[in-house]
Amino acid sequence: MRGDIFCLFPYGKNKNLHFLYNPEEVWSFYPSKATELVSSSRIKCDGHREVKNWLNKIEDEKYIYIFHLNYEFGHYQYRNQVSYISDDSCLGVLLKFHKSKLSLVEKKLSSNKIGLEEKNWPSFQSYQKAFDLGLNELMSGNCYQYNLTYPFEFKVKNLSKDNIINTYVSVSESKRGRFSMLTYIEKLGKAFWSNTPESLFQLKRGNNQAIIQTLPVKGTIDIKKAGGKEKAWAKLKNSSKDQAELFMITDLLRNDLNKIEEPVCEVLKKKVPLLAPGIIHQMSLIQISLSKEIELSKIFESLFPGGSITGAPKKRVMEILKRVESRDRGLYCGSTIMGQEGRVDCSINIRTAEIDLNNNLLKYSAGGGITVLSDARAEFEEMMLKVKSFTDIISC
C-alpha cells in the first residue's frame, strides 16, 4: 500500500497522522557518490557538498522534503575528523515529495503488528569499560561531559510493510514523540522509525528576519517509579548532576548559535519538563534572530550534531566518542529535517530505530550524558529505561 517508498508522521494543527508517498526523488549520499533510488541512477560527487546544496533547496514551497542525516555527517564540521568517515558510510537520505502526495492515514490497516525479540545487547561489563575510558578523559580535563551510547539489536517478528505501518499507526498520541516519523524505503532495504521528542532547531522566516529556536534535553526519570509526574519532576529538577548536564549543554548551544551571525541568543526557558512515553526529561528553550537571507546549510552545520548527544566541548568529545564507542551511530543521534510551508523542523534522533528489511533486524540505540558526578550502574539503568520507553510503544 502507498508504494514502496513513503513517510508517515503527525502533521497539521491537530497532529493527525499523514502519509507522504510516491516521491519524485530519493537520494542516498556517501562521501564520494550519490544514488537516486527512484531512477536507480548514480553519480560521482563530493557528498558533503551535495548535502549542503540540497539543504539550501528544501525551503522550496512547491514540495515537502524529508532529510534523514546521519550522525557521521557532523565530522565534516572539523577538518581533522573527516578521516573518521569511511567511503561506504551513508551520510544521509533525502526524499522529495510533491505536496499533492500528502494524505491522511487510515486508522488501521490490519490487526497484525510487528514483534521484537532480544538478540544482541550490551552487558554491564562492556558498558563499564567504555564508561571508565570516558571518565578518564573527564578526570584528565579533556572534556566536561560526554554522551555514551550503545546499540541494541532485536529480531523482528511478523515483519512486513503492512505490519510496520499498522504498528506505527497503533501508537497512541500520548506516546508519540513530538517529532515522530516512520520512513520506509524498500529499495534501500531499510525503514527508519523515530519517536524522538527532541528538536535540534526550528526555523521560521519572517519579513525581515529568521527566527531559530532550539530545545536541548538532559536528564531522565521513570514516572511510575517516582510515584507520578509531579514527584518525578520534583526529583529530576533537584538533581545537581542532571542540572549540571543541562546547563553545560545549554551553554554549548548558545555558543553554537552565536557562531552563525553576530546577534546574541536568549535563553527563554532554562529548565522545564518534557514528557516522553513513561519518562520525563528536563529541557531548555533558546532563541536567536538572524538575517532573513541566512542559508539553512550554515545554520545546520553550526548546530549539527546536537550538543545533547555529543557533549562539551563538542569537537574534543566527538574525537573521544570515536575511540570509546568505535562504531558509526548512523541515523541515531543524527537529525531528521522536514521543510514545508516556509518552516523547517529539525529533530535530534534519539528514541530512533533502523529496521533492516532484508534480514528482519531492528537496531535501536540509547545512552546518556556522563559527568564526573555520574555512576556507571545508574547510567546503565537509565539507558535501559530509554530502551524500554521505545519497546513499550511497539508492544502496547
Image (cartoon, grey):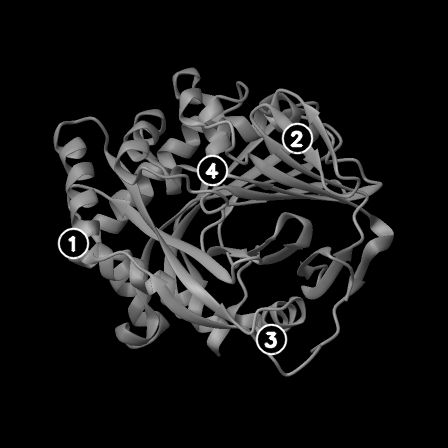
**Mark 3 belongs to which amino acid?**
Ser
Which comes sooner in the sequence, label 1 or label 4? 4
Instruction: Name the residue beneath numbered marker 3.
Output: 170
Q: Residue 66, how many percent across, how many down?
A: 68, 45
**How packed is label 2: few (under 14 Cα within 10 Å), some, or many (20 or more)?**
many
Which comes sooner in the sequence, label 2 or label 4? 2
Residue 14 at least partly seen: no
- Identify the secondary structure beneath mark 2: strand
1 over 41 or under it: above or below: below
Instruction: Name the residue beneath numbered marker 4.
Output: 71
Q: Residue 235, how many percent across, how many down?
A: 25, 63
Q: Are marks 3 and 1 in contact (CB under 8 Å)?
A: no
**How packed is label 1: few (under 14 Cα within 10 Å), some, or many (20 or more)?**
few
- Identify the secondary structure beneath mark 4: helix
Res 79 quadrant in image: top left
Q: Residue 91, which numbered label? A: none
